Image: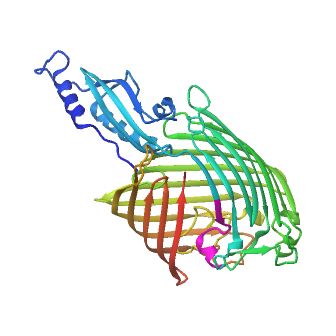
Amino acid sequence: MSCWKFRALPLFLMWIALLAGSSGLLAQSVPSSCIVGHIHIKGNRRTRNYIVLRELSFHPGDTITLSQLIKAFREGHDRLINTHLFNDVVLYIDSVNGYTVNVGIDVKERWYIFPLPYFKPVDRNLSAWGQRHYALDRVNYGGKFTHHNFTGRNDNLTAWLITGYARQFELYYNQPYADRSLRHGFGFGFNYIEQKELDAFTYKNQQGFINSDTISYAGRYLSKSFSVSGRYFFRPGLKVRHTLNLSFVSAKIDSAVLHWNPYYFNNGRTSVIYPEAIYRFNYTDADYVSYPLRGVIFETSLTRRGFGQDINLWQLDTRFVRSWPVAYKLWLNIQNNNLLKLPLNQPFYNQPFIGYGDIYLRGLDRYVIDGVAGGILRNTLMRELINVNIPVANPSAANDHIPVRIYATLFSDYGYAYNRDFRANSLVNRMLYTGGIGLDIVTFYDLTFKFAYSFNQLGQNGLFLHIRNDF
């Protein structure tokens, strides 16, 4: 949310130094390069110095031109912001000594510890919750403890204890930089969930929920799942990351679910136990991954779930995001997601596609489209309206202002979902398209509010809200 910049006086002195040199040879040609000296970091009370230096493309002793250094400052700023460790980052030339340039980096660390009460509707978005009259009995509550940057090495510890509409116990730890080379990391965790309500089928392009309290099974949990997982991270460079996730999953449903959907699992089973392996590749070269205005993000993953007839899935996912400026304070963003599941005849358990998570079409927010193949394309033109920093009443070292950016948006979305086995819903196996206008509010801690007034091919329109927080 901040900008990279030089300090004016050291930059002027650098030009003088480059022109004159330590011996004062003004008559000679201008040197084309300088030497990086010390790199001094300020403001990182918890974050280790080497975690900051890991995001830079230059190091002490490197010979570099001034134009290359300016580019390296901008790219280093973007990568440091994208670590989600800092609210503000400033890179600058601290001092010049002959041909040697000393670099300064000022950072403002975020709050890392969030012991927060948890209150969240179980529905997939606010529109879906509104269709159920914002009922409070459809809310999960409890405690969520998250400790980002747990040891100062950008490692994360998460512990959830949730009750209410469902029960969930979760513990995860990720350490992406576990060795001296800062290329290899690991993670592990477990998750246990019990639910009294289950989306057992899809009807009229909406999730069909069954509730234990309304089908004479009061108090019973209709689904239970348990998983343990381990992860390996490998980041050979600055823009590329590889992740391998291995997990063991046990999922069970009540026999009442089969009355509504005998194909929830394969072969009419009420429980499955399977291993799962997911390989993920990520390439990031963007200014701000939570709301990119410039750059490219590419992700692809290959999933192998199960090895027998009960669960047998190969899944390939891709995600491509491209953003660039087209005029003053005007940007164009294109996002494309694609999916392929093999074999094509999958049980309902493996069918979720459009309308879940971040894969949705604006204007079809009320609906879900299950499928085993297809994709979406979202196109957004963004015009910045407001870019301000609001001072806080009681400033701290981490938070002395609240950045607020507001964009007007114009968008058009397209999508397609192929479904071989569950064709009762009208939005499968057909081209989908929507459009509309909106307002995006981006603020600190990667919090984004997206208001959209959208239209779809069904002749429907409405105002929808999506809230996203990547931190």
- Foreground residue among 362 and 108: 108
Residue 119: within the magenta? yes
Whether residue 233 can be seen here? yes
Residue 289: x and y in percent read: 48, 51
Foreground: 470 or 138? 138
Kindly identify the residue that appears in the image at 41 percent across and 31 percent down.
Answer: 41
State the image quarter where residue 161 is shown: bottom right
> Does residue 33 belong to the magenta stretch?
no
Q: Position of residue 141 (x, y in %)?
A: 69, 62
Quarter of the image for residue 440 reads: bottom left
Horizontal side of 29 relative to 95 (left or right) equals: left
From what the image shows, is residue 299 above or below residue 459?
above
Question: Residue at (63%, 42%) from the top-left corner?
Answer: 243
Q: Position of residue 465 (x, y in %)?
A: 52, 70
- 416 or 407: nearer the eye? 407
| Segment tinted magenta in the rendering | 118-131
Q: Is residue 344 above or below residue 65?
A: below
What's the colour scheme?
rainbow
- Nearest the eye: 299 or 21: 21
Q: Is residue 345 visible?
A: no
Pick out the residue farthest to the left: 27
Count of number-bearing discs: 0
Above-or-below relation of 85 to 214: above
Residue 466 location, x and y as percent? 53, 67
Residue at x 51% of width, y 64% of height: 377
Which quadrant would residue 164 be assigned to in this image? bottom right
Which residue extends farthest top? 23
Q: Is residue 252 left or right of residue 300?
A: right
Q: Residue at x 23, y 37 (%)?
A: 8
